[in-house]
Image (cartoon, helix red, strand yellow):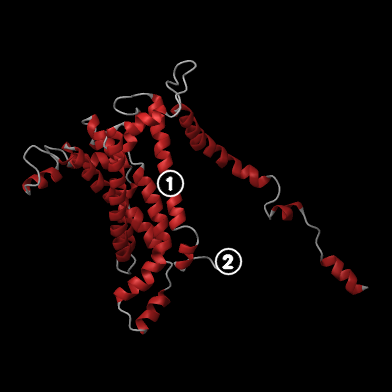
């Protein structure tokens, strides 16, 4: 009798607080609702409205005519827009590649132990902390044809003629934007790669040293394979960010519409050079949004399907 009473007394009646620990009830939905509402208002609604405007002739007049895919045809038929897409792809690929290489080198350097390491890590992040438009304006002054230090150096090295400037041509604007973007965003890549380096167990390097491996062999056989997963995530974020850059080209190309139109995002503000209509501009937005979704899908298929993460040795044991 005593044993049965003890067994019964040890069983606790589930309370309301205990039932909510597993995520049941309405409270989790109430906590998530503000975030969902913000995403719907800030992201989903503007995209759906852009899709609606892209099939209209002029949405600012009563009962606008539905033109279907005519706005998309105008966009794709415009040679300047096609050229801007090529320039955008070139800028994205080159900038992301350079930032990845430089970021990896910087991360390997600051991952070592040395006096003042914390100060160096903080100082490296300073360029990334600046707003892009501020960085662009600062570099624009250095590209100035009269007082710019970079222009002076290029003219002194006979890479530019007297009176010329790097941002005086379309190709020069792209090069100037590349230099500025690499300077500003390389710390971001270095920070993400450094986070991946710090989770690699030191025992692996010690074991490889016992086996007689050189530092170069340890880098190729240990460091790079275990950095694949964080580097892929960093590459995806940087690719999407570089593809949507606008403020750099706006600052460097503000002398002429021709220079600004070297980048595809310029056309979102007015359409093509011959059709400054909201419908054409919305078609550009939808077209570029489709490219962004395609980039994410390609990254997902090639790198983020689980097999790549597992091959990197960073997949959770769960």
Name the secondary structure under disc 2. loop
Q: Give how far across and how far down residue 154 sits, in percent.
A: 11, 46
**Left or right: where 168 falls relative to 265:** left
Q: Give how far across and how far down residue 273 sits, in percent.
A: 29, 27
Name the mark on residue 87.
none
For label 1, the crowd category at 10 Å Cα-Cα, with few meaning under 14, some 14 to 19 and many 20 or more, is few
Locate the C terminus and report the quarter of the image it occupies: bottom right
User: Reading the chain from its start, which is encountered first: label 2 or label 1?
Assistant: 1
Q: Nearer the viewer, residue 21 or 309?
A: 309
For label 2, the crowd category at 10 Å Cα-Cα, with few meaning under 14, some 14 to 19 and many 20 or more, is few
For label 2, the residue is 318
Residue at (32% x, 52% y) in the render: 96
The image quarter containing residue 33 is top right
**Is 14 rendered above or below residue 287?**
below
Q: Nearer the viewer, residue 106 or 260?
A: 260
Q: CA distance from mark 2 to mark 1?
A: 30 Å
Q: Give how far across and how far down residue 57 sits, in percent.
A: 42, 22
Q: Give how far across and how far down residue 39 sits, in percent.
A: 52, 39
Name the secondary structure under disc 1. helix
Residue at (22% x, 30% y) in the render: 256
For label 1, the residue is 294
Residue at (47% x, 18% y) in the render: 64
Residue at (33% x, 83% y) in the render: 212
The image quarter containing residue 303 is bottom left
Locate the N terminus and report the quarter of the image it occupies: bottom right
| Residue 263 seen anywhere in this rendered image of the structure | no
């Amino acid at each position: 009798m005593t044993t049965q009473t003890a067994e019964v007394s040890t069983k606790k009646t589930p309370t309301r607080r205990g039932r909510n620990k597993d995520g049941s009830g309405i409270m989790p939905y109430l906590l998530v609702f503000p975030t969902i509402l913000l995403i719907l208002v800030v992201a989903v609604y503007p995209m759906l409205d852009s899709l609606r405007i892209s099939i209209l002739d002029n949405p600012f007049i009563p009962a606008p005519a539905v033109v279907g895919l005519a706005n998309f045809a105008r966009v794709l038929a415009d040679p300047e827009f096609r050229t801007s897409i090529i320039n955008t792809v070139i800028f994205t690929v080159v900038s992301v590649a350079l930032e990845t290489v430089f970021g990896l080198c910087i991360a390997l350097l600051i991952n070592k132990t040395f006096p003042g390491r914390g100060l160096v890590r903080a100082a490296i992040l300073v360029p990334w902390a600046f707003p892009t438009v501020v960085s662009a304006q600062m570099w624009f002054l250095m590209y100035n044809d009269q007082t710019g230090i970079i222009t002076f150096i290029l003219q002194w090295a006979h890479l530019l003629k007297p009176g010329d400037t790097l941002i005086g041509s379309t190709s020069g604007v792209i090069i100037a934007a590349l230099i500025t973007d690499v300077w500003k965003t390389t710390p971001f890549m270095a920070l993400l790669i450094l986070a991946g380096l710090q989770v690699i167990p030191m025992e692996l390097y010690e074991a490889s040293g016992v086996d007689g491996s050189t530092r170069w062999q340890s880098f190729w056989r240990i460091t790079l394979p275990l950095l694949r997963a964080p580097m892929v995530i960093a590459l995806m974020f940087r690719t999407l960010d570089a593809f949507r850059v606008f403020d750099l080209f706006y600052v460097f190309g503000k002398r002429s519409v021709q220079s600004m139109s070297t980048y595809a995002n310029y056309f979102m503000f007015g359409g093509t050079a011959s059709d400054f209509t909201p419908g054409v501009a919305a078609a550009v937005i939808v077209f570029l949004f489709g490219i962004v979704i395609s980039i994410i899908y390609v990254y997902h298929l090639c790198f983020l399907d689980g097999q790549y993460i597992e091959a990197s040795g960073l997949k959770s044991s769960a």
